[in-house]
């Protein structure tokens, strides 16, 4: 084994073992302790965070921030990593934002100039647009840490019904339309709920971890499947909407509505799909916002909800109009 191979192997070994002695490494690689010491000094000079402990039970250990061994990338793989990073660029908040930016900066600096130029061109020609959000999400890293450690957290949460302290255990985090959500078990309601991360005003680890649940069989992907199964068992309604050409374009931008979209030869269309009661309020607001480009023909419950909201709007604006006259 040549020196370069040995350095890489030593780096892999110390990252796994965390604590070791010169003798252990010398035996492992069949070299003298002096040679191992020189190798460790070289790794330390390259940035590997090694710490020496004196005494009978001493030795070396790697500090928490470990350095990974060198990895060889092809040009296409390097460009692909930056391609993937573009999808994160316009998020207002990311749980590991500083680490992500630092890793990309280090990676970019060691690339050949022609590959850098290709990546720069890619960034000027490719855009993953995330809807701009004005809400700050300062506690995203703490929420992610709580999800990873599966700790019971105490959050100060502001919902539509007011501000309240809750004890929760997060299933994980997911992002949708630029916002971050936290599915979690709520110990107050004894049920799983989804919390908006930007509405979390403070986060701390609960002093009582005895109630902690085993969620090892409920990763974030399984939670999504579970939610979908619950939706399937709820009472369903037949959503039928008539669309103008503009209505087709508007509703086509929404993945849920687009799954039931049918387009005619003249560019007009209609939506025909099932919906649960939980979508009623959202659907009423959405179709009111589309004006005459989307006419809801069913279900009757949704049509009544739209009429009631339009009546309330007319009442609110009607009084103002009367007073101006």
Image (tube, grey):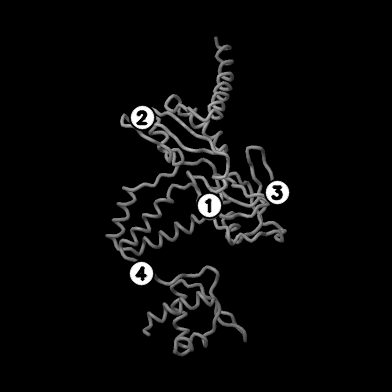
Q: Which residue is disc 2 drawn over? A: 268
Q: Are marks 2 and 4 in contact (CB under 8 Å)?
A: no
- Residue occupied by mark 4: 72
Dot 3 or dot 2, earlier in sequence:
3
Earlier in the chain: of badge 2 and badge 1, it is: 1
Alpha-carbon span between mark 3 and mark 1: 24 Å
Mark 1 or 4: the one toward you: 1
Disc 3 crowd rating (10 Å Cα; few below 14, some 14-19, many 20+) is few
- Give coordinates of residue 50: x percent, y percent: 52, 75
Judge by depth and name the residue closer to the eye, 184 or 145.
184
Q: Is residue 324 above or below residue 257?
A: above
* SS for dot 1: helix
- Asked if the residue under mark 4 is in contact with the one under mark 1, i.e. CB atoms within 8 Å, the reply is no
Task: First in sequence, mark 1 or 4: give its number.
Answer: 4
Q: Quadrant of the N terminus?
A: bottom left
Q: Please tell me which residue is depicted at 66% across the width and 57% down the height of the picture.
A: 152
> Residue 144, position in %: x, y?
56, 56
Q: Earlier in the sequence, mark 2 or mark 4?
A: 4
**Dot 2: element:** loop
Q: Which mark is residue 214?
A: none
Relative to 123, does residue 212 appear above or below in the rendering? below
- Seen at 40% across and 62% down, the residue is 106
> Which residue was labeled with disc 3?
188
Name the mark nearer the viewer: 2 or 4: 2
Classify mark 4: helix, strand or loop. Answer: loop
């Amino acid at each position: 084994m040549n020196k370069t191979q040995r350095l890489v192997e030593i780096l892999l070994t110390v990252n796994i073992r965390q604590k070791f002695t010169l003798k252990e490494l010398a035996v492992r690689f069949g070299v003298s302790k002096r040679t191992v010491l020189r190798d460790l000094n070289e790794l330390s000079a390259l940035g590997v965070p090694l710490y020496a402990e004196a005494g009978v039970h001493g030795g070396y250990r790697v500090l928490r921030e470990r350095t990974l061994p060198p990895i060889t990338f092809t040009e296409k793989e390097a460009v692909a990593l930056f391609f993937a990073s573009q999808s994160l660029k316009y998020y207002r908040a990311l749980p590991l934002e500083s680490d992500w930016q630092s890793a990309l900066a280090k990676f970019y600096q060691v690339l050949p100039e022609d590959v850098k130029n290709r990546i720069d061109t890619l960034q000027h020609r490719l855009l993953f647009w995330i809807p701009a959000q004005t809400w700050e999400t300062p506690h995203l890293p703490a929420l992610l840490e709580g999800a990873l450690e599966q700790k019971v957290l105490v959050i100060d949460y502001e919902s539509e019904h007011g501000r309240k302290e809750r004890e929760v255990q997060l299933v994980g985090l997911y992002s949708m339309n630029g916002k971050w959500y936290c599915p979690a078990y709520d110990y107050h309601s004894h049920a799983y709920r989804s919390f908006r991360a930007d509405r979390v005003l403070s986060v701390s680890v609960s002093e009582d971890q005895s109630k902690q649940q085993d969620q090892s069989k409920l990763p974030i992907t399984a939670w999504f499947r579970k939610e979908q199964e619950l939706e399937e068992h709820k009472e369903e309604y037949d959503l039928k909407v008539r669309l103008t050409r503009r209505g087709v374009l508007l509703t086509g931008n929404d993945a849920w509505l687009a799954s039931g979209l049918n387009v005619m030869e003249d560019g007009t269309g209609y939506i025909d799909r099932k919906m649960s009661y939980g979508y009623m309020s959202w659907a009423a607001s959405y179709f009111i916002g589309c004006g005459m480009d989307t006419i809801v023909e069913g279900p009757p419950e949704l049509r009544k909800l739209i009429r009631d909201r339009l009546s309330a709007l007319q009442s609110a604006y009607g009084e103002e109009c009367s007073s101006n006259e």
